[in-house]
Amino acid sequence: MTELELWLKTGADVHEGLRLLSVYNPNPYLAEMVKAHPDKYRALLIKTLSGITREAVASTAVRTAKMRDEWPFLSEDDCPMELKILAADKITAWKNYVTNHQKLFSVGSLEDCLETAKNCVFFYCQNRKIFSEFAHYKEHKAILGKHPIFQELDRLKNYRGMDVLSLIQNEKNLLQAIWRLKRRMGKGDRPDLDESRRELLGSKERELAEVRRLISSYNKAYGR
């Protein structure tokens, strides 16, 4: 019995489900939805994890074991939280790179080929940025800190100290920023900025999800 099957059999606890999601199918958007409204999205979490096959569980376990062999500090108690988060992102980035690289040999049009090639470059760069952080920490036992996740987590901590009016204003600002980014990306006139814009868009969307979660928590606490 896999730990996913055991989780389902023992009641599908939401907190444990989020941990399993981060390991077997990292999805920050679903995770934020579940955190904000666990009763509403628990069924979607169960459906998502139930769709993961035993073969996928075994494959992920092998990759995770190899990663911990290569980067032993991930198993240490004093390992920075940011690096543990990046470990799951590294697995996902590599899987997506491999998938898109294989797809390059079967695409049916030049447009599809270009889009797939862009994805390959994006996920490869994502993986290498994380590699740089891991390699630096392994050698120096100190954080390099160049990966965008460090600044993003600082912003998330800052949101958690805000009052509700400030959160609402930040929600509006983030929505505007996301709209502008999508508009610029939709023009397709700056391919040299595609990677950085895509990365920034993901960061802004995660920030928006956290801000909305905090606003929702405030409304629940005060019966609004």
Image (cartoon, rainbow, N blue to C red):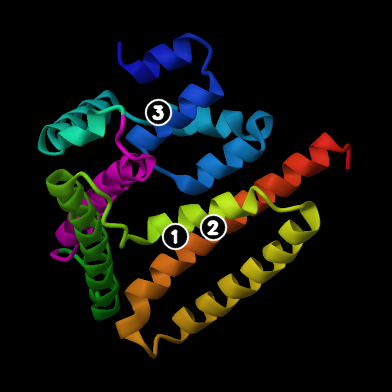
Residue 204 within the magenta-colored segment of the rendering = no
- Are circles 3 and 2 on residues that touch, CB within 8 Å? no
Query: At 19% across and 59% down in the image, what residue appears?
Result: 128
- Are circles 1 and 2 on residues that touch, CB within 8 Å? yes
Q: Residues within 10 Å of mark 1 (few under 14, many from 20)?
A: few
Check disc 2 and give the amino acid type. Answer: Arg
Check disc 3 and report the residue beneath it: 20
Query: At 17% across and 66% down in the image, what residue appears?
Result: 104
Query: At 25% across and 44% down in the image, what residue appears?
Result: 91
Q: Gap in Å between the C-alphas at discs 3 and 1?
A: 25 Å
Residue 81 within the magenta-colored segment of the rendering = yes
Relative image position of residue 53 (x, y in whole percent): 30, 28
Figure check: 121 above or below 84: below
Check disc 1 and report the residue beneath it: 151
The disc at residue 82 is none
| Residue closest to the eye, 122 or 104 | 122
Magenta extent: 78-105
Q: What is the secondary structure assignment of the residue under circle 2?
A: helix
Labels 3 and 2: the sequence-earlier one: 3
Figure check: 42 above or below 101: above
Labels 3 and 1: the sequence-earlier one: 3
Q: Residues within 10 Å of mark 3 (few under 14, many from 20)?
A: some
Query: At 60% across and 54% down in the image, what residue appears?
Result: 158
Q: What is the secondary structure assignment of the residue under circle 1?
A: helix
Check disc 2 and report the residue beneath it: 155
Residue 136 as seen in the image, left or right of residue 25:
left
Residue 209 as seen in the image, left or right of residue 85:
right
